[in-house]
Image: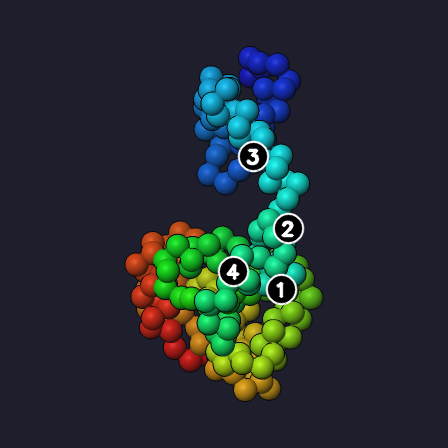
């Protein structure tokens, strides 16, 4: 039977770190030890940064991005093309597209994809706000930058039908995004090619 080798505070730190994506129990222990060893230069500043982030981070009421201002930095950026709206599943996908520098448009974060097996229905997604934004004057194209999974493509079809009555061009990502692939794991070159070679949905 495994024995606890540290106090409850350290064990709690390890358990919380283990909940992060990509960190299992062993990696969490190594990370916790590293933080403890570098308490002054890493643990304390990280603790302060997390506290401040927790106090200040808000979800943008317009697009669904996370930021420390309302509306978010992207929505306030006057240099972005307001005629194009890029629809993504999650904030991580928005950040991935921004890293690629492939598009200079506005975004809309759905907050997930339709998934009957997981009980995710249209009312659970940020769809009402999407229709309102696409209905605004000046929006001419909606790019569905959703993951090439069954749920992602089901959501893309649903959105296409939802926007069918509006005079906008609906496109989707093309070459470069593998079936079953997720945007957050793709390199910048692949994302750039996918944006450039988008096709009508």
Q: How far separated are the C-alphas under marks 2 and 4?
A: 14 Å
Instruction: Assign the N terminus to one quadrant of the image.
Output: top right
Residue at the disc numbered 4: 74
Camera-nearest residue between 103 and 170: 103
Name the quarter where the C terminus is drawn.
bottom left
Spatial distance from mark 3 to mark 2, Cα to Cα?
A: 15 Å
Q: Is residue 16 above or below residue 201?
A: above
Mark 1–mark 3 Cα distance, whole angstroms, equals 26 Å
Q: Earlier in the sequence, mark 3 or mark 2?
A: 3
> What residue sits right under mark 2 in the picture?
58
10 Å crowding of disc 1: few (<14), some (14-19), many (20+)? some
| Left or right for 199, reference 36 | left
Q: Earlier in the sequence, mark 3 or mark 4?
A: 3
Q: Earlier in the sequence, mark 4 or mark 1?
A: 1
Q: Tag 1's secondary structure?
A: loop
Residue 83 rendering spot, x and y as whole percentages: 49, 76
Residue 62 tag number: 1
- Extreme front residue here? 78
Horizontal side, residue 123 vs residue 97: left or right: right
Q: CA distance from mark 2 to mark 1?
A: 12 Å
Q: Earlier in the sequence, mark 2 or mark 4?
A: 2
CB atoms of marks 2 and 1 within 8 Å: no
**Mark 4 vs mark 1, CA separation in Å:** 10 Å
Name the outermost residue toward the right: 123
Element under label 4?
helix
Instruction: Name the residue tied to disc 3.
Output: 49
- Which sits in the foreground, 162 or 129? 129
Judging from the image, what secondary structure is the residue with disc 2 in? strand
Instruction: Indicate the secondary structure of the residue bearing disc 3.
Output: helix
Whether residue 95 is situated above or below residue 77 in the rendered picture: above
Residue 34 visible to the viewer: yes
């Amino acid at each position: 039977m495994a024995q606890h080798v540290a106090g409850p505070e350290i064990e709690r730190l390890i358990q919380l770190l283990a909940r992060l994506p990509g960190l299992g129990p062993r990696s969490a222990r190594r990370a916790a030890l590293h933080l403890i060893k570098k308490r002054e230069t890493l643990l304390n500043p990280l603790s302060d940064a997390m506290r401040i982030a927790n106090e200040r981070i808000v979800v943008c009421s317009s697009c669904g991005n996370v930021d420390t201002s309302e509306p978010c930095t992207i929505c306030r950026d006057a240099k972005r093309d307001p005629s194009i709206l890029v629809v993504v599943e999650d904030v991580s996908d928005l950040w991935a597209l921004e890293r690629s520098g492939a598009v200079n448009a506005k975004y809309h974060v759905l907050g997930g994809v339709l998934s009957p097996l997981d009980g995710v229905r249209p009312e659970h997604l940020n769809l009402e706000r999407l229709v309102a934004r696409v209905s605004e004057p000046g929006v001419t194209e909606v790019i569905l930058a959703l993951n090439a999974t069954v749920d992602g493509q089901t959501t893309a079809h649903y959105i296409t039908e939802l926007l069918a009555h509006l005079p906008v061009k609906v496109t989707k990502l093309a070459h470069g995004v593998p079936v079953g692939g997720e945007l957050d794991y793709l390199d910048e070159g692949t994302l750039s090619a996918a944006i450039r070679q988008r096709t009508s949905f």
